[in-house]
Image: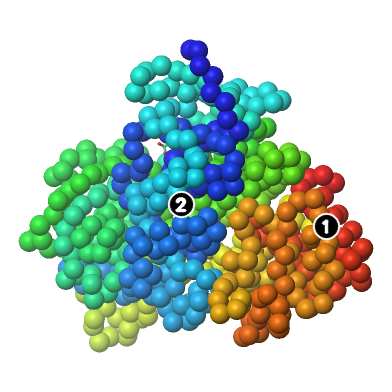
Amino acid sequence: MSTVVETDVLIVGSGPAGASAALALSTYGVPHIVVTRYASLADTPRAHITNQRTMEVLRDLGVEQDVVAQATPQHLMGDTTFCTSLAGEELGRVRSWGNDSLVQAAHDLASPTRMCDMPQHLMEPVLVDAAVARGTRLRFQTEYLSHTQDTDGVTATVRDRLRGDTYEIRAKYLIGADGGRSKVAEDAGLAMGGQMGVAGSINIVFDADLTKYTAHRPSTLYWVLAPGATVGGIGAGLVRCVRPWNEWLIVWGYDVSAGAPDLTTEYAESVVRKLVGDDDIPVTIKSSSAWTVNEMYAETYANGRVFCAGDATHRHPPSNGLGSNTSIQDSYNLAWKLKMVLDGTADPRLLDTYTAERAPIGRQIVTRANKSIGETAPIFEALDGLSPQTPEQLWANIAARRDATEAAAKQRARLREAIAFKVYEFNAHGVDLNQRYDSDAIVPDGTPDPGFPRDPELYHQPSSRPGAKLPHAWITSGTRTLSTLDTVGQGRFTLLTGIGGDAWVRAAEAQEIDIATVVIGSGQEYEDPYGDWARLSEVSDAGALLVRPDGFVAFRHASAAPDAGEAGELLTDALRRILGHA
Ligand code: FDA
């Protein structure tokens, strides 16, 4: 072992968490290296649902349109279907992922972005290509082995899997984005709650032209209730569209106590045939792999100079499509903090807010994703299909719902209700967008927490209260229409005010750090012709919002500052607290 390579940040892993950390750091000009174990990026579709918050992050990082260009658009995602097989009986549908008319309106109101279906093997190259173009140094086939840390930095030992030798990388900070079996998290001794291996699942990736069973009810997901579908796994057999309507991924459960079955092509094909229900369709199996459903979250995301992100800190099933979304959002939260600590703008204490802000979110999404699995059971219950029985009994129960009897009417109602309840998995707009932070990087404004008047999992409820993400409103600048979110980000703080807020603008311009200023109002650089911002901002025209680089409100003053001096004091004090100098 001879060479020691030096950098500011070492990132282990090139999945959604590592790739987005690299993209953000390269955008902010922070020197870093990514090491990743394999010779290529993800070679299977894995995570895919990409929610509006993630699209906002990608918009700020300049790759939103690259994702849109490759993703399956929202309108082809939404007819989540429950059936006995694709060719078999349909039991019902849920309009999903913002495709219900009311939820669609909520999506339109919430964000300038649209959710989409971007399979992981397409997402990773977009993130990594942009990161490398902006300066990321990426080492494929390089495996993290161990690390030590001292007061000045972290020394990681890595193995070059091509040459077989090991060398050291010395960094000021280490990000463990090495997935659900994170060695970095283990070596850093991050305390974890919950358990791994709750149930067993198999992914089967295959090609087949299923247009005739899917194009008339376009969806990302088709759920198949068939004998055996309740065993292990994610609650039922799942046929997932990778690319409409020729590339697919099936998720099928197995009894985790008995171990995964032998994943031969014959076995994979038998599962595909069972769920598709048409033996005449040509099928090409591309790959099969076994994985376990986990319910685990880290209590703390950091130890000293080592930070973990993504599945390294939250491990859960794919329900609600939260895996890569939360991973990308973790990295986005961490990256600007590292940048500001490394360039001396912030005290290292700012980094403590990473755990304070992201660990509660991680725990929440692990709980939600696992709860969603349990919420599939009432569909089987409505068909008396949960207890062990023969296939004939299940088919008879399913057929019985067509009868003109009181009992069948009740069964139909139970089935409708059970399917509709899956909205908590397929249309949980609040889960995607209602994140609130409570940490030392947020300055409370003394207002009581209003909580969420509506169901916080289903409904997005915007707020400008410190700790909430800046509300989206369409504003204009000359002939251009843009979102309020487009005025913030890009690695710096932004002060938003309106007519009469000159004192805030002067105070922002007088700070030692670069703060963008945005004045919204009649005759100003930005105008609010629809009055949307006035309705959403929760501050008077001359009030102020200080927004962090990640789009979260850090400080709010609802009314005008008496004069420039007081505005300066308030803003300076707020920044000192946010940046860990107080
Ligand atoms: P991720 O696991 O994506 O990336 C980890 C990275 O670290 C990889 O690049 C890996 O090579 C690297 N690495 C690991 N150890 C290393 C070491 N010692 N040294 C160097 N590099 C190392 N989610 C979902 O929502 N729907 C789905 O259908 C699926 N399906 C699915 C299938 C399979 C097979 C997997 C593995 C995962 C899924 N997921 C999923 C989960 C989803 O993929 C997951 O939530 C995100 O990929 C998490 O992103 P991360 O970047 O945190 O980890």
Is label 2's Cβ within 8 Å of ligand 1?
Answer: yes
Closer mark to the observer between disc 2 and disc 1: 1
Count of numbered circles on the image: 2
> In this picture, is 268 found above or below 453?
above
Is label 1's Cβ within 8 Å of ligand 1?
Answer: no
- The answer to whether any part of residue 382 appears in the image is no
Nearer to me, 322 or 199 = 322
Residue 126's disc is none
Label 1 secondary element: loop
Residue that carries the numbered disc 1 in the rendered image: 510
> In this picture, is 499 found above or below 337?
below
Residue 449's spot in the image, x, y percent?
Answer: 75, 67
Residue 555's spot in the image, x, y percent?
Answer: 77, 61
Label 2 secondary element: helix
Residue 535, quarter of picture: bottom right
Residue 371's spot in the image, x, y percent?
Answer: 48, 58
Residue that carries the numbered disc 2 in the rendered image: 324
- The answer to whether any part of residue 350 appears in the image is yes
User: What is the C-alpha distance between the residues marked 2 and 1?
Assistant: 39 Å
Residue 214 shown left or right of residue 462 in the figure: left
Residue at image location 29% in from the left, 52% down from the top: 252
Nearer to me, 89 or 527 = 527
Residue at image location 50% in from the left, 65% down from the top: 52
Residue type (three-letter) at the residue carrying disc 2: Ser
Residue 155, quarter of picture: top right
- What color scheme is it? rainbow
Residue at image location 46% in from the left, 51% down from the top: 324
Contact between labelled residues 1 and 2, with CB atoms less than 8 Å apart: no
Sort mark 1 into few (<14), some (14-19) or many (20+) by Cα contacts within 10 Å.
Answer: some
Residue type (three-letter) at the residue carrying disc 1: Ala
Name the quarter showing ligand 1.
top left
